[in-house]
Image (tube, grey):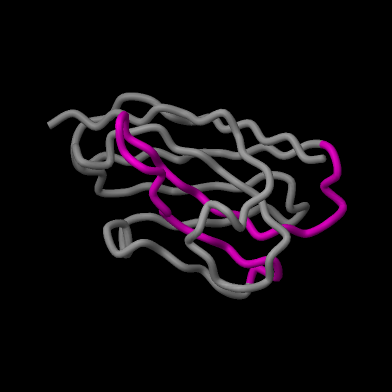
Amino acid sequence: QVQLVESGGGLVQAGGSLRLSCAASGHTSTTYTMGWFRQAPGKEREFVAQLTRGGDFRYYAESVKGRFTISRDNAKTTGYLQMNSLKPEDTTVYYCAFGTIYHRSSSEADYDYWGQGTQVTVSS
């Protein structure tokens, strides 16, 4: 089992930046693929970014490409989502997730462990 806790959310003006963190505990000896998703009230959960298990590839939703960067520390116990040039439409709850897949995936079904989410609010 892996437990994930996100932090770093908050209120920021449009054009500003935030860095979300995802702290993992439990069975972290395994290297997992890491994903970030977001979900607005009344909407389906949306893929944001993925970092593959080996750390070789990063994938992004078109809506955040060029503005967001996913990364992980060397110990692979903390993941990050650096968000720059934030827009009001980025306002929502952000979730990190770990999975054991090796392939590229934007499907939440491929991720086994989820954090509780952190709220990001971007004011115009």
Pick the quarter of the image with the N terminus.
top right
The image quarter containing residue 86 is top left
The image quarter containing residue 119 is top left
Q: Position of residue 81 (x, y in %)?
A: 48, 48
Q: Position of residue 38 (x, y in %)?
A: 40, 42
Assess whether residue 47 is covered by the magenta stretch.
yes
Q: Nearer the viewer, residue 43 or 36?
A: 43
Q: Position of residue 106 (x, y in %)?
A: 48, 61
Q: Nearer the viewer, residue 100 or 81?
A: 100
Please tell me which residue is depicted at 38% across the width and 25% down the height of the picture.
10
Please tell me which residue is depicted at 72% across the width and 39% down the height of the picture.
24
Assess whether residue 17 is covered by the magenta stretch.
no
Q: Position of residue 114 (x, y in %)?
A: 62, 39
Please tell me which residue is depicted at 21% across the width and 41% down the height of the picture.
89
**Stretch in magenta:** 26-55
Whether residue 75 sits left or right of residue 33 in the image: it is: right
Pick the quarter of the image with the C terminus.
top left
